[in-house]
Amino acid sequence: MLYECSSGLLGNGHHLHGISTISFQAWLSQSKRSKDYALPNSSWSQDMMDLYSRFLEMCKDGTWKRIPSYSDTADHVPGKACVHLESLKLANEKERKGTRFFPRNLDTEGVGFEYAMFLNPSEKRMVCLFQPGPYLEGHRGFAHGGSTATIIDSTVGGCAIFVAGRVMTANLSINYRNPIPLGSVVLVDSKVDQIEGRKVFLSCHVRSIDGQTLHAEATALFIQLNSTKSLQQQVSSQ
Ligand SMILES: CCCCCCCCCCCCCCCC(=O)SCCNC(=O)CCNC(=O)[C@H](O)C(C)(C)COP(=O)(O)OP(=O)(O)OC[C@H]1O[C@@H](n2cnc3c(N)ncnc32)[C@H](O)[C@@H]1OP(=O)(O)O
C-alpha cells in the first residue's frame, strides 16, 4: 500500500503538502529504532560543532527543525511518503536488506558524508551543515564534485519532499566556483523557489561558514510522483 499524500497544516498555517502533519511531527519527535546519523560524533570539527549548536539554538522557538537521518531511506522520510516505499516493490525483501541510503553508507565516523540538516518550514528552506571526509576525495585534498552533487541533491531533495512528498530529481544543474577542502565545513543552503503543478523548482548555494567563499551554486527541478502511478509505471511509461 503506497502512503497516500495528503496536505496538512504545519504550525502557523503553512501547508505541508504531500506529508500529513501528524506523520511529520510524529516522525520528528519519535525515537527511531535505527541510529540517527545527524547527531554530533567525535569526528566533527569544532567548526561543525559550533555551527550545529547555533542551529540547535534557533530550533528553540520552532523556526528551525533538526532533521534526523538514517541509513535506511524508508526510515528517514516522514510517513515514508516517498518513492522508496514503491521501490521496495521493485526489490524483494532480501535485496532491500542490503541497501543503504547512499550518503549514509559508511559506518566509520568522519570518513564520508558528515552532515546535519535543518528545515525552516515557513521559508521552505533546508540547510545542511556538511563536513566532507577523506573518502570523498576528488582532486588531492578536495571533495569530489560528485560528493558535492550528492549533498546538494539530498538537501534540495529534503526540501522538495517537505513541500511535495514523493518526489524524484528531474534536473540538477551545478556551477562549481571554488573547490571544497576535505575536512572543512560548508553550509548548503537551499530553498523552494516555485511550485508549478507537480514541478518543484529549487535553488541552492554552498558557502564556507564565514560566508566569504562561494563553493557551488545549483538549481534543481523535482517532480512530485503521480500518486496514482507507481514508480515502476512512472519509469516504464517514459
Ligand atoms: C520534511 C522532509 C524531510 C525529509 C528529510 C530527508 C533528507 C534526505 C532527503 C533525501 C532526498 C533524496 C534525494 C535524492 C533524489 C534522487 O536521487 S531521485 C533519483 C534521480 N532521479 C531519477 O532517477 C528520475 C528519473 N526520471 C523519472 O523518473 C521521470 O522522468 C520523472 C522525473 C518521475 C518525471 O516523469 P513523470 O512523472 O512521467 O512526469 P513527466 O510527465 O515526464 O514530467 C512532468 C513535467 O515535468 C517536466 N519535466 C520532467 N523532467 C524534466 C526535466 N528534466 N527538465 C525539465 N522539465 C522536466 C515535463 O516537461 C512535464 O512538464 P509539463 O508538461 O507538465 O509542463
Image (tube, helix red, strand yellow):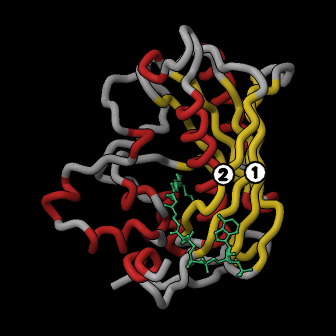
Ligand 1 closer than 8 Å to label 2 CB: no
Does any portion of residue 212 appear in the rendered image? yes
Which quadrant is the N terminus positioned in? bottom left
Q: Measuring 54% from the left and 34% from the top, which residue is drawn there?
A: 146
Return the residue nearer the eye: 185 or 15.
Answer: 185
Q: Position of residue 197 (x, y in %)?
A: 73, 82
The image quadrant where one finds ligand 1 is bottom right
Return the residue nearer the eye: 93 or 119.
Answer: 93
Residue type marked 2: Leu
Q: Position of residue 6 (x, y in %)?
A: 58, 84
Q: Is the C-beta separation of discs 2 and 1 under 8 Å?
A: yes
Q: Is residue 161 above or below residue 234?
A: above
Residue type marked 1: Thr
Q: Measuring 65% from the left and 38% from the top, which residue is drawn there?
A: 56
Return the residue nearer the eye: 114 or 231.
Answer: 231
Q: Dot 2 corresponds to which residue? A: 172
Q: Dot 1 corresponds to which residue? A: 219
Q: Measuring 27% from the left and 71% from the top, which residue is drawn there?
A: 90
Q: What's the distance in space between the residues labelled 2 and 1, CA to CA?
A: 6 Å
Q: Quadrant of residue 163?
A: bottom right
Few, some or many residues within 10 Å of mark 1 (<14, 14–19, 20+) = many
Q: Position of residue 38 (x, y in %)?
A: 49, 38
Mark positioned earlier in the residue sequence (2 or 1): 2
